[in-house]
Amino acid sequence: MKNNWKWFLLIESLLIIVTLYQLINNLFILGLFAIGCWLIFLGRKQQERRKKTNLAIGLLLTAFALMSLGGFWYMSIAAVIFFYMNYGKVFSKMDTFNFQQAPWNEKEIVVVETTDSLPKNAKRFKRNWLGNERIGSSIYEWDDINFSIFMGDTIIDLGNTLLPKEESYILIRKGFGKTRILVPTGIGVMIEHSSVKGKVLFEGQCYMLENESIKMYSKQYESQARTIKIITSVIVGDLEVITI
């Protein structure tokens, strides 16, 4: 076990050197990392309110800078492999999970409930700047979606609503995080996505973006009675549009 730890520390040390080399050779990431460290240091000497703000922003910038480096992920992978190989026996004592009873394998028949149309004029929505959000976990009346969020994962399920026989829109502006949109079969989909870094998964195809925009249409888009236009922009994050 001691020899294993020696090899682990040696490999991690080498990967730290690789990470530092990548950091020094990327001026943008190096600047973010330096600003984040400076805000963390500055926050320790300020009042309580400013301290929390500076510490939060500093930690976010530092974490983003590190996660943008390949060496950081190599270190994480090496750590996961090491602990699994040396302490994986702990998991063997747990009961085997029956994946046939997993939630995603359960099937349910949902009867669509209808209600009177609700007024839409001056309708206001409260969205959080941080955190994960799921839209459509229960049956709801459709209304175009338009919001901004700084960080967090978003899931939008269109299977629990009925789209009108016209164009519908989803507009999302996001800083960091993944967006997943579930679209029922038989609905035409148009995607217009821009990203500094991330990927787009659509109709079984994966597209990597680096400070690029992409526009795509689903098959037989023009012939569908109901269509949805998805317009998104993100700094770092992925977009997945899945047909259900």
Image: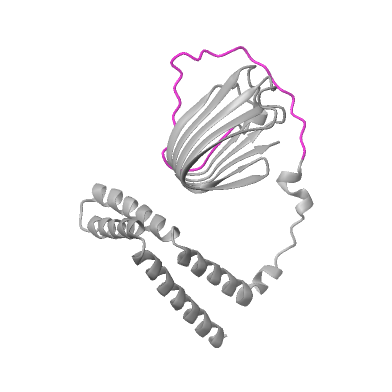
* Residue 21, x across and y down, in percent: 38, 70
Residue 134 magenta = yes
Work out whether residue 118 or residue 217 is closer to the camera in this orientation and state it.
217
Work out whether residue 7 or residue 18 is closer to the camera in this orientation and state it.
18
Magenta-colored segment: predominant secondary structure: loop
The residue sitting at the bottom extreme is 3
Quarter occupied by the N terminus? bottom right
Q: Quadrant of residue 22?
A: bottom left
Quarter occupied by the C terminus? top right
Residue occupying image coordinates x 77% and y 31% = 109
Work out whether residue 125 or residue 186 is closer to the camera in this orientation and state it.
186
Q: Quadrant of residue 82?
A: bottom right
Residue occupying image coordinates x 71% and y 44% = 104
Lateral position of residue 85 relative to residue 15, left or right: right
Residue occupying image coordinates x 52% and y 79% = 8
* Residue 103, x across and y down, in percent: 71, 45
Which color scheme does this rendered protein use?
one colour
* Residue 190, x across and y down, in percent: 59, 30
Question: Is 36 situated above or below 137?
Answer: below
Work out whether residue 131 or residue 151 is closer to the camera in this orientation and state it.
151
Lateral position of residue 87 relative to residue 126, left or right: right
What stretch of residues is rendered in magenta? 107-135
Number of labels in the image equals 0
* Residue 213, x across and y down, in percent: 49, 40
Residue 214 magenta = no
